[in-house]
Image: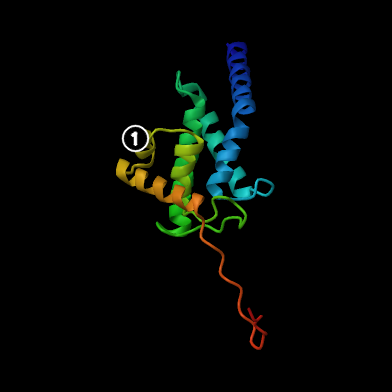
Amino acid sequence: MREGRASRGTRRDDEFAAFVAGAAGRLLHAATLLTAESPDANPRARRLLTLALAHTYARWDGLRGEDPYNHTRSYLATRFAHAAWHHYGALGRARPHPRSALAHLSPQERLVVVLRLYEAIAEKQTAALLGLPVERVRTLCDRATALLLHPPRDPAPAVVAGAKVAAS
């Protein structure tokens, strides 16, 4: 009896390790995009991924044919959404890495862009996952895409008093 449990436990661990080996890189990249951290310094993304993988491992036997990648990605996205809401408010902004391509987006906009464009999840599925109307997801994605294509300009440098102006 014990040998059977040990064998199942070893098989479970091997299956999960194989899943992590194949999926962790892509999931970490998605988490890094969500947190808008630098890929070289991404402690929040790593913590988010660790929590999502731990959640998947805890439910591994109960997945019964469900795609573990989808399960982990869903947990990662909802965990990020809840953390962003509680830490920064509904419309608040995290403090992203200034050189991140997604730095100008709100956490909700980043979430929708990552799910829709990076993970290629359909609009309806994204809306269902986030508990938002499809129209809201479409609006967030459109706004975020426009900001990515045309990022806000940096403020103009301050004019120094007494500086000479070149004559034309």
Image quarter for residue 164? bottom right
Q: Is residue 87 left or right of residue 10?
A: left
Residue at x-position 61% and y-position 55%? 97
Q: Amino acid at mark 1?
A: Lys
Among the 4 quarters of the image, the one containing residue 30 = top right
Name the residue carrying label 1: 124
Q: Is residue 64 above or below residue 101?
A: above
Question: Dot 1: what SS?
Answer: helix
Question: Which residue appears at 63% of the width and 20% of the height?
Answer: 14
Q: Position of residue 70 (x, y in %)?
A: 47, 29
Report the residue at 55% width, 54% height from top: 103
The C terminus - image quarter: bottom right
Q: Which residue shows up at 46% across the image and 54% down it? A: 106
Q: How is the image coloured?
A: rainbow
For label 1, the crowd category at 10 Å Cα-Cα, with few meaning under 14, some 14 to 19 and many 20 or more, is some
**Image height of 59 relative to 64, above or below:** below
User: Which quarter of the rendered picture does the N terminus lie within?
Assistant: top right
User: Residue 26: image x %, image y %?
Assistant: 59, 33
